[in-house]
Amino acid sequence: MRTVRLFALFLFATTALAQKIPDWFPKPPPLLPPAGNIVRASTAQQILTLGEQLAPDTTLLIEPGVYTFDRPLVLRAKQNISIRSASGDPTSVTLQGKGWEAGDNRDDIIHVANCTNVTIAALTLAEARSYGVKVEAENAPHDIHIFNCRFRNIGVRAIKGSAGNDPNIRAVGGSVRFCDFENDKVPPATWLYNGDYIGGIDMMRLKYWIFSDNTFRNIKGRNGGGRAAIFIWVRSENIVIKRNVIVNCDRGISIGNPGVSTAADAMPYAIGVTILNNMISGGADCGIENWHTLEVHTDHNSIWRPDRNFNRGLRVGDGALNTISQNNLIHGGIQLETGADFAGFHNITNRLNGYFADPENGDLSLTADAAEAINHADANNGDPYDIRGRFRTIQPDVGAWEFDAPPTNYWVEPMRQVHSKFKGHRGTLAHFGDSITFSSAYWTPLTSKPRNMSTPVEKAYDLMRKYMRADSFQQKGPEFGNTGSTTMAWARDNIAKWLTSLNPEAAVIMFGSNDAASVLPADYEQALRQVVDACLDNGTIPILTTPPPRRKLPGDRYILSGAYDTTIRRLALEKGLPLIDYSYAIDERRPFDYDGSRGFQDTPGDTYEVHTLISRDGVHPSNTRAYINDFSDRALSNNGFTLRNYLTLLTYAEVIQQVLK
């Protein structure tokens, strides 16, 4: 087995060297230590047997090695389970089928059926004729997550999402994140469609799925007619595809299909799809296409087309209704087919030679020659971060890359200068805010050590507890700068008093949920600037926090929390302030269903007991009891106060490490 494994690793390593993933591409965060029950497997038969017998709340850890399956691992009626490599390194464990050449059309590796909360992580799936992972939407799975896995030489689909005939049964809630897909083989002409029936991800009947931070290389058919790296269709709804790099695949991203579905489903194929901050280079057919869809938004993507089908950077087909495209940078064109309903804004299409660092190998980072793209995006409509997760500037760039993006530590030196003026006690932290800060669900729970922390987060927690004064956990009330029904104007009117009485070394500042109903952004900004300037003059480090998104309530004149987010981010950049982007983190985790006032009416519990990030009142964060002070990924997507505590802890610990110490 050891010899086979070394050969397999050598084969995959030489393929990766041919098209290297750019060094700047985000790395996956470390897996948490396994929770609940743990079982271990070190043979193929153990993996199949133990995997199919997993009890709820169990993790299957697979020891290093290459394991060949003679049948798929079938997961049915599983709840809260994980299957992952023991080391957390996807190169350490390879699960393989019968082989690209030797397998048949049933040569799959993993099937996921009627399961809830399944994570498949840190594995390599390779050399299977048919599917790597099959997610059976016809069996109504929920919360299926594939994380930091590698897929190598999967003959039909690396990830397949099947569908049945009932249009109301779907795979609800799921993600594919930080995975790497690559083939170094091309199907022979004897395979389906003359060797063109191959793709990366092909999924049907999805709802609330996210595909982010993945890489795809050389997913190609024999004649250039392969399916897309990411292909979503057949009654799918509310999908986000962001921060992926796609290189030399016949198609990049396909939403919908020009033909009729084998599932006999009604059009449109997909509703509510966001395609954002992706880089797509090469490929025989097209960069991004959509057919028979409703409300597909393509924003801030960078695309490099070869001469073949040069104009198909974006291809908008028949039945594509309300397709909106903005701030895309395309070496190529936008091809509109008959029946396309399309609106485009601030897109650049042309021969953009010299604009990109290494387009042949998928690195579409901008060069200084990209003058038409730099600082020419619509500043009011676009993502505030680029493909790396770096801040966009006040006047952002077109495409996925921000050329002059500030470094992640942009605030460190300015805050060191501010701190040099501070004359008070070390470790004093104030919290200025409305009821979301006054609540005992904010910050106070951290008096106890949270569960399920990764090693870096645990280090941040220990640093915070060692440095911060203990009384900062209990400072609740107007005299401490926080109480209900308050606005930024209240903070402006009282900041001098708080700075005198508290004299904090640092202060977390978050207002906006009450302002949003009646205060115009210009007035909000003016008050915020006065609060920030008073802190800076005192030598206090202001840690700005974007308020959570909120719905419009009866009697509200406006709903402007989104505009406040832009104001806060810009002020943080302008003055070099640390930022907790709470609003963005909520949108990252629950882009479509964060609002507990919509769609959660039939779930039991009080106002705050709702399994999303905003409570049933549509304003305050949720506080689901099961996830209080739990820093697992699932908890951070289901308890809004826990998510705020987590983000605040990480930022404050970084301020301590970089400035205060």
Image (tube, grey):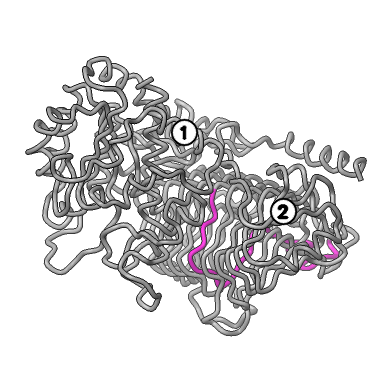
Asked whether residue 151 appears in the rendered view, the answer is yes
Pick the quarter of the image with the C terminus.
top left
Residue 627 placement, left or right of 427:
right
Answer whether residue 202 is magenta in the image: yes
Residue 146 placement, left or right of 382:
right
Q: Position of residue 651 (x, y in %)?
A: 38, 35
**Between tags 1 and 2, which lies in front?**
1
Asked whether residue 567 appears in the rendered view, the answer is no
Q: Quadrant of residue 108?
A: bottom right
Q: Is residue 181 above or below residue 498?
A: below
* Residue to which mark 2 is pinned: 220
State if disc 2 and disc 1 touch (CB < 8 Å): no
* Residue to which mark 1 is pinned: 462
Q: Position of residue 345 (x, y in %)?
A: 34, 51
Instruction: State the residue in front, 217 or 167.
Output: 167
Q: Quadrant of residue 281?
A: top right
Residue at x 59% of width, y 58% of height: 145
Sequence order check, earlier mark of 1 and 2: 2
Q: Which residues are magenta?
A: 189-212
Amino acid of disc 1? Asp
Answer whether residue 237 is magenta in the image: no
